[in-house]
Amino acid sequence: MERAAQLSKICVDFCGGKCCEPWWGIILYTITKSGGLSRLNDFKREVHRGIESRVERIRTRYVTSEKPPRLLFGEPERYNVTVEKCAVAGDTLRIELRAMFAFKCLFLSTDGRCQIHPSLLGSDIRPPHCARLGSPEAEAMGEGYCRIIDRAVRSSMDEGEVASAIEMESAVSRKHYDEGCAASGEAAERVIASIRRYCEEHAPHLLPVTEAKKPGRNDPCHCGSGLKFKKCHGQS
């Protein structure tokens, strides 16, 4: 059996759609917030719109090559948006975000088989990224890279090594999925909470004047958790 056929068999028969259930769309991008943490509700709406626009960018990009094309994804099952880095310049925050969206591929069967895989159709109508995914020539973590295929090639198709790579991929995906949330609005709220925590620890001068003063132990915590300060950020 030629290597291409072997790799295809791993994707269709052995892997069972681990890279597609869910399929993770990942986007790194930067946002800025001027004026410190004033007008946070407006900024939260801006963050929310940014998340939604990137979801839509992915959905409209991943379509079949048919005419008319068909979308591969509906709305994400999970939103995992994290603050990777913050930088302060005067009263302006520069915030680097990593947005990860867990999509369910509409062409993945209940037994984990890609219903538009060329090994089943005889032709390839997948989006270019899907067609490149699993390329044995892909550089580590680069475009088209797949840990499972990489391990298969490097181990000369050792089934134990491939099974280990599949389990590792599943564990990483489960972790990201469990750490995410079900709605884009909640994801935006988490981003705002992370930015607020950063300012509390590293840039208190950016906090609104009413928040810069430490609240009483029995006052509501300023992070919006609904807990008393002593039970939340005031714990020693």
Image (tube, rainbow, N blue to C red):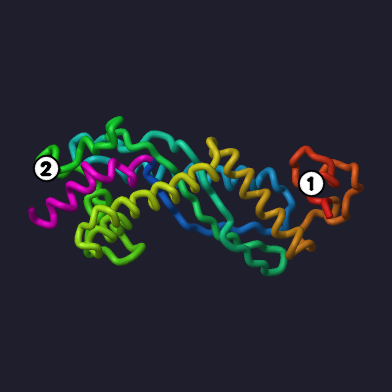
Residue 85 rendering spot, x and y as whole percentages: 59, 63
Q: Is residue 200 above or below residue 112?
A: below
Assign a secondary structure to mark 1.
loop
Residue under pointer 2: 123
The region drawn magenta spans 1-21
Among the 4 quarters of the image, the one containing residue 201: bottom right
Residue at 25 percent across and 46 percent down: it is: 127
Could you tell me the amino acid type at mark 2?
Ser
Q: Report, in whole angstroms, how far the alpha carbon at label 1 lies from the one at label 2.
A: 57 Å
Q: Please tell me which residue lies in front, 147 or 65.
A: 147
* Residue 220 in picture, x, y percent from top left: 84, 41
Q: Is residue 102 one of those drawn in magenta?
A: no
User: Mark 1: few, some, or many residues within 10 Å (few <14, many ≥20)?
Assistant: some
Where residue 95 sits in the image (x, y, percent)? 59, 60
Q: Which mark is residue 232?
A: 1
Mark number displayed over residue 33: none
The kind of secondary structure the magenta stretch mainly shows is helix
Tell me the SS state at disc 2. Answer: loop
- Residue plotted at (88% across, 55% down): 213
Camera-nearest residue between 111 and 200:
111
Mark 2 nearby-residue class (10 Å; few <14, some 14–19, many ≥20)? few
Q: As rendered, which of 222 and 5 lies closer to the eye?
A: 5
Tell me: 1 left or right of 181: left
Residue 141's image quarter? bottom left
Mark 1 vs mark 2, foreground winner is: 1
> Left of 201 or right of it: where is 58?
left
Number of callouts in the render? 2
